[in-house]
Amino acid sequence: MIYVTKQMSFSASHRIYNPSLSDEENFRLFNQCANKNGHGHNFTIEVTVKGSINPLTGFVINLKELKDIMQEHLISLLDHSNLNLDIEFFKHNIPTSENIAIFAWNILEDKIKNAKLYKIKIAESNSSYVEYFGNSD
Amino acid sequence: MIYVTKQMSFSASHRIYNPSLSDEENFRLFNQCANKNGHGHNFTIEVTVKGSINPLTGFVINLKELKDIMQEHLISLLDHSNLNLDIEFFKHNIPTSENIAIFAWNILEDKIKNAKLYKIKIAESNSSYVEYFGNSD
Amino acid sequence: MIYVTKQMSFSASHRIYNPSLSDEENFRLFNQCANKNGHGHNFTIEVTVKGSINPLTGFVINLKELKDIMQEHLISLLDHSNLNLDIEFFKHNIPTSENIAIFAWNILEDKIKNAKLYKIKIAESNSSYVEYFGNSD
Amino acid sequence: MIYVTKQMSFSASHRIYNPSLSDEENFRLFNQCANKNGHGHNFTIEVTVKGSINPLTGFVINLKELKDIMQEHLISLLDHSNLNLDIEFFKHNIPTSENIAIFAWNILEDKIKNAKLYKIKIAESNSSYVEYFGNSD
Amino acid sequence: MIYVTKQMSFSASHRIYNPSLSDEENFRLFNQCANKNGHGHNFTIEVTVKGSINPLTGFVINLKELKDIMQEHLISLLDHSNLNLDIEFFKHNIPTSENIAIFAWNILEDKIKNAKLYKIKIAESNSSYVEYFGNSD
Amino acid sequence: MIYVTKQMSFSASHRIYNPSLSDEENFRLFNQCANKNGHGHNFTIEVTVKGSINPLTGFVINLKELKDIMQEHLISLLDHSNLNLDIEFFKHNIPTSENIAIFAWNILEDKIKNAKLYKIKIAESNSSYVEYFGNSD
């Protein structure tokens, strides 16, 4: 069993606030992340899959194929977007890194053939990141 | 003469478009950077000053002092902001990296004592940056 | 279950030697790391916690809160210190990265609320690091 | 139990193709990675070992010793080589990152004393890497 | 006047040797870089142009346009190539970083419109790079 | 004319204080950098030389040769040292990055053959650095 990881990035804006709470409560919970007009990041996403080596290719998965799947189904949605306003899922879920990881997992899980999705890592900056291993973890 | 540089970062959203042009023209010029609801970046700013060494301290400038000036006059405005909506200057100037560099120069030029502002570098990502040396260049 | 990581850094000096051994033995074991007057590093510390998402916030833990805990209880002690001379724990334990990780774990373990401390990672340089998962591992 | 990691790098060239397949099939599977004259990378290798702390040294393993083992048995073979032409193993195994990880595991497994080899990570670039934990995983 | 830089990368192999010298002399001058079957790198190229801001766009040059020029005229040639065997220029010039910089300058100089090519930077690794400012420097 | 740069690093401790001033004045000027027992950094040094390409080699200077000069004359002194106590120059000059740059320039200037020393860059961390071009600047 070998684990293979592809990292990509997307530039997006978001606002961290809970519409069911008052503005005061939002600022107490989220500080400047709740600023009215939003802010943004260069998000990094790492997708890790696990599988055995295909003797024909020496690959678990062709990284170009993994990159194409990520680009078509995920990056094309998220890059240069406003997460809160442009992505349906984040109209009902606060667009934290945690929820972006779950969003990415749900989209990618059944798109990857011949290998099994193992981990999604979302980094909002060089010093902050989250990791999600799916429900089974 | 020695050159001293401090790097800081800020997370902001922006939309690159020219309100005096049609939507079609904006998308032709700016592609997805003109998307209606904006997007965002972790911007990096480097401020370089030049001067001679103060024999009392061995410093051209105390980097903590330079950092405090950058934080008070620049980062506090830009971090977790929507550049287009929250910063007066960018209501009249497209918030490109080039214009952010000029904005930073104009704010910092006369705030730095005992050394001379030499360069502002603004990076929107790891692979793209601009450098501005003031009008005299 | 989601894993959330915050990275911070501290600048410290240390000397790697065992006072119960001869100088010759120390140099055989530790080479230049045993130099008499010490040396130093920009250490990086990553703290990983695990927990489930709080539906009120979309966070496992507010990263600002995790950073404040790290700053107050750990970084304020270690940053700009001489580990051997300034930190009580390292008067009885050689200040290797391994022992710094255990020191950090012991300090942070019961300071983190609503999530469980999972891993401490200490990097002395870009090319060397240790990871500690607590006694249970 | 503590995990200790050393990162090193080597510059090598390789060609990804399967000699038992036609050129057409190779290009379909491997695109430009199958180009006739090969290409190259600055490969990064991370070796992680696990063990308990030696109370005499405060180390699981002396990182200088781990680095010397990696240099003598692995980097000296791979650095500034053409993997396909210069390394016997890759005359029978396509020199993908997956197979380089297995090659490194097999060489290092019994060279490390007082600690147990845990993981080999091979990165072909900043955005692509594989991880291998040995057969037992 | 503002300076704008785009960084891209390419993976290539090369062999540093001078065919007009003996093997012994080549190894004396180039060590393992002269190994017979070549080796490789992830090369980084930074292209810096200078110009004034276009008031219509807020850009000196659209970085997407600069990236497209670099991709079409330079990266498409160099990426996944063997510099010595695949690129005509390096049949008559040793493929050092210095000569790659001159090769890139000569190709790009007249392809960039509305701004002036200022610098080519070629990095063979994280710790080694060359910079070329054209003949006028 | 081409500029060639080699980056190396060294781990050292230092204390920033001026022995001719009171402790109170030292803490006002240098904050925690004046802590009595010192602290440390992984310092990065970049040495840039300029020259023309030698047609025999395609190099301005062999980077291995430049690295050997830096190692022999500079890194061997500074690495794993306490700058204040172990280096004669810093008994009379506060070991700031500015003064380390001048120290390095003075040592290296006449050691480099066939190319001219152009710049010394010293970085104390990822976010702070100084650059020195010699007296002629």
Image (spheres, coloured by chain):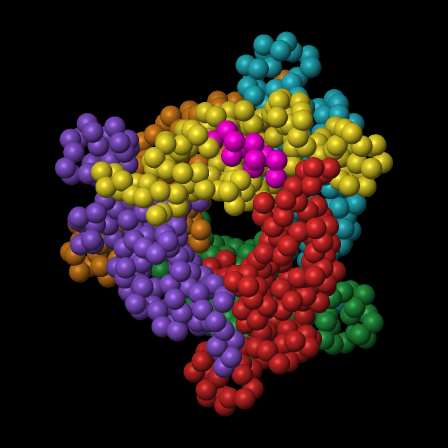
Chain colours: A orange, B purple, C green, D cyan, E yellow, F red
Q: Position of residue E101 (x, y in %)?
A: 56, 37
Image point (78%, 29%), residue name = E20
| Above or below D89: residue F112 | below
Residue sitting nearer the eye, D76 or A31 = D76
Q: Position of residue A16 (x, y in %)?
A: 26, 50
Q: Position of residue D36 (x, y in %)?
A: 65, 18
Tell me where the magenta segment starts and ends, as one range: E98-108
For residue F75, which quarter of the picture?
A: bottom right
Residue sitting nearer the eye, A63 or E58 = E58
Residue sitting nearer the eye, F126 or B112 = B112
Count the marks. 0
For residue F104, which quarter of the picture?
A: bottom right
| Above or below C135: residue B31 | above
| Above or below A7: residue F12 | below
- Magenta segment's dominant SS is helix
Image point (76%, 51%), residue name = D68
Q: Position of residue B62 (x, y in %)?
A: 44, 72
- The answer to whether residue C54 is seen in the rendering is no
Q: Any magenta on residue F122?
A: no
Relative horizontal placement of residue C96, taking residue E48 as reference (left or right): right
Residue that extends furthest to the front in the rendered view of this protein: E136
Image point (70%, 61%), residue name = F110
- The answer to whether residue F50 is seen in the rendering is yes
Image point (51%, 88%), residue name = F21
